[in-house]
Image (cartoon, rainbow, N blue to C red):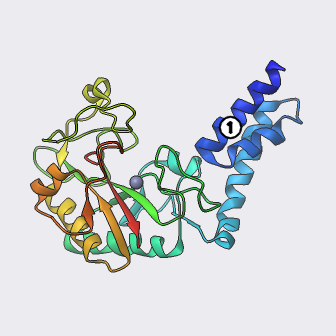
Amino acid sequence: MLRVLCHFLVIMFLTILTQIGGIAWGIALFFRSRILAFILTYTALSIATIWVAPNFGRVALNCFDDGSLQVQSVIYCALNRNYVSPQLAQVLIETADAVDKGFPGAKTLVLDANFPFFDGFPLLPHLSHDDGDKADLAFYYKDENDYLPGVVRSPIGYFAFEQGPTNCVPKWPTLRWDFKFLQPFWRSYAIEPERNKAVLQILSDDARVGKIFVEPHLVNALDVAHPKIRFQGCRAARHDDHIHMQLK
Ligand SMILES: [Zn+2]
């Protein structure tokens, strides 16, 4: 009984993390070398998904692209979290090209996007990333001298928060994590104002884009106020470690 419960929990966990992983574990249960069977099945299903997902209205962002638009970490692709609608793919490619045009060599990095299948299946912890039309972008960073292409402060681009004034008071339950204990581990780069301002202006001016979430203190600091750039609210995740954008 305990074994069944354990496998159920593993399937749940893998499904929440990768969508496809739970199925791969279910198949692996029929094999003696379970871990090996899981790795092979998961890899095969994930690769097949690149060709299957377009039939379900999602396309994979290319993890090996070294152009102006890049997926920040191969982890996002390994976990099948790099899928978007064809229109969002187009918006992201055009946005990255536009930033690169203004600032040659600029790399626009995508963080969590969506899973490959089913509308309404959220990509936790991002409750809204459930239809292919949402994506998170990393900030552009600089050291004391210059912009650092393709570089972020934390290994996965999230949770390196810029500190600034906020009206939010701690209130339970909340997804507004501060992860104070993690902050000393991150690289001490600063937000690169010009490229961050440019990408927010390009997204705001794009008629296909509906909403952008960035923390108000950064909107002020970058001077990019626009009706599309909103505050996500005090109970949602902070947006001073990344940019959230979604289509109309
Ligand atoms: Zn988001």
Q: State the residue in front, 4 or 201.
A: 4
Where is residue 60, by image quadrant? bottom right
Q: Name the residue that disc number 1 marks.
A: 12
**Quadrant for the C terminus in the image:** bottom left
Q: State the residue in front, 141 or 179.
A: 179
Residue at point 48%, 66% (across, down): 133
Q: Position of residue 145 (x, y in %)?
A: 10, 48
Per the image, label 1 sits on a secondary structure element best described as: helix
Q: Residue furthest bottom?
A: 207
Q: Is residue 17 left or right of residue 169?
A: right
How many numbered circles does the render carry?
1
Q: Would residue 200 be visible to someone looking at this image?
A: yes
Q: Would residue 100 be visible to someone looking at this image?
A: no
Q: Position of residue 10 (x, y in %)?
A: 70, 32
Q: Position of residue 233 (x, y in %)?
A: 30, 49
Q: Is residue 217 left or right of residue 63?
A: left
Q: Amino acid at mark 1?
A: Met
On screen, residue 139 above or below 32 = below
On screen, residue 155 above or below 222 = above
The quadrant where ligand 1 appears is: bottom left
Residue at point 80%, 40% (across, down): 26
On screen, residue 156 above or below 134 = above
Q: State the residue in front, 125 or 143.
A: 125
Crowding near the residue tagged with mark 1, few <14, some 14–19, many ≥20 C-alpha atoms within 10 Å? some
Q: Position of residue 95 (x, y in %)?
A: 33, 72
Q: Is mark 1 within 8 Å of ligand 1?
A: no
Where is residue 209, by image quadrant? bottom left
**Quadrant for the N terminus in the image:** top right
